[in-house]
Image: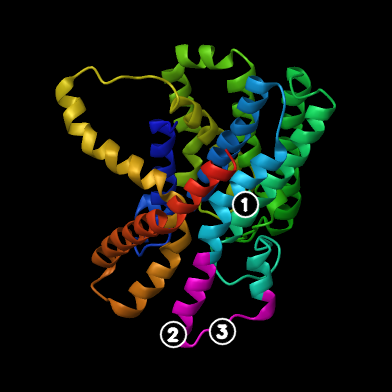
Amino acid sequence: MRIVGLDILRSVAIILVLFRHSQLFSNPLYDFGWLGVDLFFVLSGFLVSGLIFKEYKKRNKLNIKRFLLRRGYKIYPAFYIFLVGSIIIEHYRDGFVPTFTDLLGEIFYLQSYLSHIWTHTWSLAVEEHFYLTLALFSFIAYKTRTLAKKQLVISTLIALIVLSFCMRYYVSYPHRNEPFFSFMATHLRSDGILIGVLIGYLYHFTPFFKFFTKWRWAFLIVSIALMLPGFYYAGGSYFMNTAGLSLVNLGFGILTLFSLTNFDIKSSLLKQVSKPFILFFTMVGKHSYSIYLWHIACRNFMNDSLNYGPNMNSLIFFVLSISVGVILSIIIERPFLKLRDRYAA
């Protein structure tokens, strides 16, 4: 079953990414937009680890092969069709031919470490590495009967989050006086995913969520405070590369838990007014993977074909990216998800 609050957060993540890749350079959401990818990381950590946690709680066992197979049906067909289709489009657009090294980086999901064709697919590599690592460590934890040992698992996850921060700090420190320094390596961007796994474990194995629900509005205020540095400090700055990114990711983790709480709208009028917006955001969130895949190709088309000024160009870019993503999600993703439910139920 889909959770509306999480779909809305997915839509927020993809809309932030679209802002970042639009021409709205003076908009605060442009400055914050690069963190949309990290919101996706937190959500993936929570949701994907939740698949394993729920199965373990329900059946007291894990089927890692089934887990990886279902992930494969979800991720690979849409990505490889995008890869082939986008290369063909770019070739006819400007004669583009990828190098063999770039192509290997894309095919084997090594974009976060090797050269690659597209500027945004590095995040897909980070998530793919997470799926494989989660499967391995979950299998080990299951076999060693440690998955339900709360203190051990929580301590380990916190230690890994701190380790990810320390590695990022180590890499960023020599560049502390530079206005911009970027990195994409999985081990340097993994604390968001780990925070997602941590809140997922707390949600599924501890009574923490009951406490959280009672104080959810206070937690929301804390979440907003933690995310504020993302609006004040530039992406790639020394502070955001170190403490800032960790703070924002923690804010995203709290926001993810908040999206699971029940806060019914009392007013029937407010319900009617908000319903179209909720339907739109849940639709965008549901198809966010395909929108993310194709939005840079849509931007390239826009840059070549239209010049109506930054505001109109950005509006068309938003509409085109969402429309193309939703249509291709229905055409490509949906059939493979039906096959997944049939053969990897």
Residue beneath disc 3: 97
Residue type highlighted by circle 1: Tyr
Left or right of 336, for residue 60: right
Left or right of 79, for residue 153: right
Q: Residue at x 52, y 42 (%)?
A: 341
* Res. 238 mark: 1
**Badge 3: how crowded within 10 Å, few (<14), some, or many (20+)?**
few
Quarter-of-image position of residue 55: top right
Q: Position of residue 21 (x, y in %)?
A: 42, 62
Q: Position of residue 260 (x, y in %)?
A: 45, 25
Residue beneath disc 2: 92
Task: Give the secondary structure at mark 1.
Answer: helix
**Badge 2: how crowded within 10 Å, few (<14), some, or many (20+)?**
few
Task: Give the secondary structure at mark 3.
Answer: loop
Q: CA distance from mark 3 to mark 2?
A: 10 Å
Q: Of label 1 and label 2, which has the lower sequence position?
A: 2
Question: Mark 1 near mark 3, Cβ–Cβ under 8 Å?
Answer: no
Q: Is residue 88 magenta?
A: yes
Q: CA distance from mark 1 to mark 3?
A: 36 Å
Which segment is the magenta one? 81-101
Left or right of 159, for residue 332: left
Q: Main secondary structure of the magenta part?
A: helix
Q: Residue at x 78, y 28 (%)?
A: 142
Residue type highlighted by circle 2: Tyr
Task: Give the secondary structure at mark 2.
Answer: helix
